[in-house]
Amino acid sequence: MDSAFIIEKSVFIVAVFAITMIMAMYSTWAERKVAAYLQDRVGPNRAGWGGLLQPLADGMKLFAKEEFFPNTPNRFLFIVGPAIAMSTALMTSAVIPWGDKLEIFGRTVILQATDIDVALLYVFGIISVGVYGIMIGGWASNNKFSLMSSVRAASQMVSYEVAMGLSIIALLMMTGTLSLKEIAAQQAGMNWNVFYQPVGFLIFLICAFAETNRTPFDLAECESELIGGYHTEYSSMKMGFYLFAEYANMFISSAILAVLYFGAYNYPGMQWMVDNVGVNAANILGIVVLFIKICFFIFFYMWIRWTIPRFRYDQLMHLGWKILIPLAIVNIMVTGVCILVFK
Amino acid sequence: MSPVLITFYFLAAFTLATAFLTIYSKNPIHSAIYLVLCMASIMGHYLLLNAQFLAIVQLIVYAGAIMVLMLFTIMLMNLNKEDEVHKPRITRLGAIVVFILMSVVLITIFINSKTIMGEYDSTGEDFQSIKVLGKVLLNEYMVPFEFASILLLVAMIGTVLLTKKEKEQK
């Protein structure tokens, strides 16, 4: 392991961290703008052109607010809650392939922080640990509504993780690998997985909504029943971290959706670009294409949020256990039969 | 001392400390959180042995799924001192006997697995990769693997049956 390799990876990891933060920041701005557009309003337009400085102003406000602690015997766990939520939201980006490769000063730079053998399982592992942020924070708040919210979040996450895992199995049977880099490379051209796995994609999409706690599955922070949900007692930047973690999760899950099902950084004519224009230009365009896909999914999240009302809790459980899981199992069987017949 | 050894000592100390704290904490939620940390540190041990797959499965299954359910149950239960049911002495005795039997099984597995590990080492095959692991599980250990899955299925159906309310007869 030479020093150039360490520098290259460090720069790359810092860049991914910065991009995740910026995307999460501007997702809050985009959320308001999309909401305003769908409700025929203007949205934020005071700070900067079109309200573009609004996220910065919000961040400054959250930092400057009074830090309030509820009457709880678990002050330490109260602080740990948002910290876990934020760090697990950022950890998943380590295995996402942001592009193919670049050639800088004669070195081939792979645009991925690390390519481990079990990348997809790593993502699932981090997601399953992410729920502790909400659970511990909600419990340490010493408040009945927060506790109920964290119990809801836990049962929701556990139920939808099962369907999510099953929907991925059908995809894995097709690709034959757990490495996100290889899954991305297999989808060259217009060979996107969504055309072969439409049902799997649909199940994964619904579960991604549930895992990121977004409407219509945001029962953990359902205002009409639970005040503010698990972050009722939180104030200042600890509250900001919870909100920010949700947007960071949204960005990462959009990236995973794009990589798994929508061809990652591939676009039609990529090979032609590599042959005629050069590797760097073709792959930088690939990164841009991936970000366009990610932005589309982030928009899709917001579109759904301002279109569909929240589910009732029993409806949520019914959908997860009695519809999505059997559907995912049928999808696995159909995929198996298709692989046997066509390959 | 090599960095790997230092990491191992640190991890081992962490695992043992969290395991003891799990038993000694008064608050059941604190116990559960220490157990989560213990499970996560075991994942570190697997990584030191270069067993990526096992480490991730440890994270998903134990630290992720089982402990979330455990915390969930503890949060739902009313764990006040006055409601605590008095346990008869025979259950404590039973627990000790079961623990001793379990440790005998675990120690036997540990002693026997050492020789098998050596055999795999000498073949020079990367027995930690998922491809090799999958092939070994579904060829060499096919029957025990299927038995384990049937056992899990039966346990699952049993739980569903227990929770189901019986229909009142008209």
Image (tube, coloured by chain):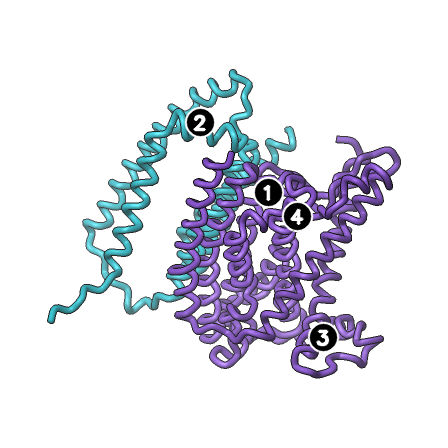
Chain colours: A purple, B cyan
Q: Who comes first in sequence, dot 3 or dot 1?
A: 3
Residue that carries the numbered disc 2 in the rendered image: B136
Q: Quadrant of the N terminus of chain B?
A: top right
Residue that carries the numbered disc 4 in the rendered image: A263
Q: Quadrant of the C terminus of chain B?
A: bottom left
Specify few, some or many for label 4: CA neighbours under 10 Å numbering under 14, 14-19, or 20 or more.
many
Closer to us: A324 or A118: A324
The amino acid marked with disc number 1 is Ala
**Residue A13 in the figure: left or right of residue A153:** right
Read off the chain for label 2. Answer: B
The secondary structure type at the circle numbered 3 is helix
The amino acid marked with disc number 3 is Lys
At x 61%, y 54%, the residue is: A257
Q: CA distance from mark 4 to mark 2?
A: 32 Å
**Residue B127 in the figure: left or right of residue B159:** right
The secondary structure type at the circle numbered 1 is helix
Q: Position of residue A148 (x, y in %)?
A: 44, 71
Q: CA distance from mark 3 to mark 4?
A: 28 Å
Circles 4 and 2 on the same chain: no
The amino acid marked with disc number 2 is Val
Residue A31 seen in the figure: yes
Residue that carries the numbered disc 3 in the rendered image: A33
Residue extending furthest front? A342
Residue that carries the numbered disc 1 in the rendered image: A119
Task: Confirm or deny contact between disc 4 and disc 2 (CB under 8 A).
Answer: no
At x 67%, y 46%, the residue is: A190
**Residue B5 in the figure: left or right of residue A167:** right
Q: Nearer the viewer, mark 2 or mark 3?
A: 3
Q: Position of residue B39 (x, y in %)?
A: 48, 46
